[in-house]
Image (tube, grey):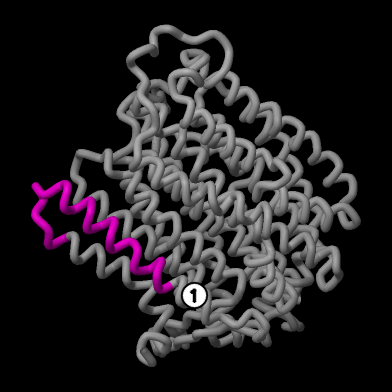
Amino acid sequence: MPFIFDHLLTLILFSPVLAAVVILFLPREGTRLIRWVAFVLSFIPLILTIVLWFNFDPSQPGFQFEEQYVWYSAINSSFHVGVDGISLTMVLLTTLLTPLAILTSFTIEDRVKSYMVLFFLLQLGMMGVFLSLDLLIFFVFWEFGLVPMYFLINQWGSEKGEREIFGGKKVRARTYASFKFMIYTMAGSLGLLLAIQMIGVVSGTFDLPQLLSIWPDLQGSLFGLPASTVKSIAFWAFAIAFLIKIPVWPFHTWLPDAHTEAPTAGSMILAGVLLKLGAFGFLRLIIPLYPSEAAYYAGALAFLAMLSIIFGALASYGQTDFKRLVAYSSVNHMGFVVLGIAAAAFAAGTQNAVIALNGAVLQMFNHGLSAAGMFFLVGVIYERTHTRNLNEYGGLFPLIPVYGGILIFTSMASLGLPGLNGFISEFLVVRGSWPIFAIFTALSMIGLFFTGAYILKGIKQVLHGPLNENWIGHVSEINARELFVIVPLMVLMLWIGVWPAWILSVINNAVMMLF
């Protein structure tokens, strides 16, 4: 047991690699065996994370369960991992959604071994970002996670559809979406890498706890420029990379294509966890390393957040593709996360800032649950109808009443219905942001209005209205395996909506210590 507790984060981080290695040795023809072994092994990180959760002390300042090993001594970079209340909630979200996504993937028939290996490597990349306390290691994991997701979209995405690119050339839609995802994210990462290298050269270390005592108070000149100018440039290099990943308007255009073409489990993880990496970057790096710059440019971030909330909701309402409707809703919901972060950056240390940032972190967790659930439910109906066109559904509630009830429940959680998880986090963001950015917050309510509109549109088009008789005898009810995927998410949506203290107490202590 002492070994486990001394190396708990390393075990959580690298257990997916062990799972991937085990799967590599399984016979390629044993599809059923590969699926079940992958599913069972995916619980190892979750079990270890639950152990971590119950042994984590929210009242203790700083990072806990730290491990540090020399990685690249010549540039003073180390493998340094640790958790606080913010990263702990994100690791819990990741390890919770991965088994559910793998269970969802039981419908995958093509190259199942490769698919499962990539899924575990994707989990490694995501958790590495949440656990890293070294800027260079952070960047390595940040980039590493791109590769598995690229291949999951490119190789296992939707087989339908083509997109026209330059010169009138046509490519498969999933090829277009995967390249767009990769190019957008890597474009943002270039500036991030240069800024990280610059910080390492100036400070003589990439270790985050050390940098927190050096970089924010750095004065004088750097590279022949005032330090404040250099730090502002570095701030935007970080910010743009993270804004693309979240994503906010106008950096969001890669998201609907990636979601639409990704396999169902890929969309669950993309919306549930990958989008959170950008928001986490603001919390872990930008606010602590650039407090002055974050406060100065907070108005710009709040403006982009407001536009994301409004335009995301309007774009979602205008969709006839069920999956694209849910995809654009992520732009809308993640806008609240950025609004809370901007408010906290502007008024750091105040009660309103603490409330807003509590809401932002909880919204990250809540959106991970509701978005993963919504994408899963879109996949369930698509597997039965082979269409995502909302106009081709209609009146399906009598045929699939259990699915219909689950879809309404999950949609209401996404909507922010009081008593479910989405209400708690969005209320905290709005309550905290209102005294700080009253105009931006008030205008964001336009987006909240259209959130209700697009949610109700989706429910109406799928479940209500005249029954499309073409589906009689062709649409089956949600099955037991699918219930095992969605029920845990529904339980958490209700649990947080009724009693959020169990997770907010962990988040709040970390937020208080951030300032």
Main SS of the magenta segment? helix
Can I make out residue 96 in this image?
yes
Quarter holding residue 239: bottom right
Question: Residue reaching furthest bottom?
Answer: 2
Q: From the top left corner, tell me how far across and down residue 310 is, in percent.
A: 73, 36
Residue sitting at 18 percent across and 65 percent down?
Answer: 22
Q: Is residue 196 above or below residue 490?
A: below
> Mark 1: which amino acid?
Ser
Q: From the top left corner, tell me how far across and down residue 431 is, in percent.
A: 83, 54
On the rendered structure, is 325 left or right of 126?
right
Can I make out residue 297 in this image?
no
Residue sitting at 65 percent across and 58 percent down?
Answer: 362
Residue nearer the viewer, 54 or 252: 54
The residue at which mark 1 appears reads as: 132
The magenta-colored residue range is 24-48
Q: From the top left corner, tell me how far across and down residue 158 is, in percent.
A: 34, 31
On the rendered structure, is 401 left or right of 330?
left
On the rendered structure, is 7 left or right of 296?
left
- Disc 1 residue crowd, few under 14, some 14–19, many 20+, Cα 10 Å: many
Q: Is residue 299 above or below residue 333?
A: below
Q: From the top left corner, tell me how far across and down residue 384 is, in percent.
A: 35, 24
Residue nearer the viewer, 8 or 234: 8
Question: Does the magenta segment cover residue 316?
Answer: no
On the rendered structure, is 372 left or right of 169?
right
Which quarter shows the C terminus? bottom right
Quarter holding residue 457: top right
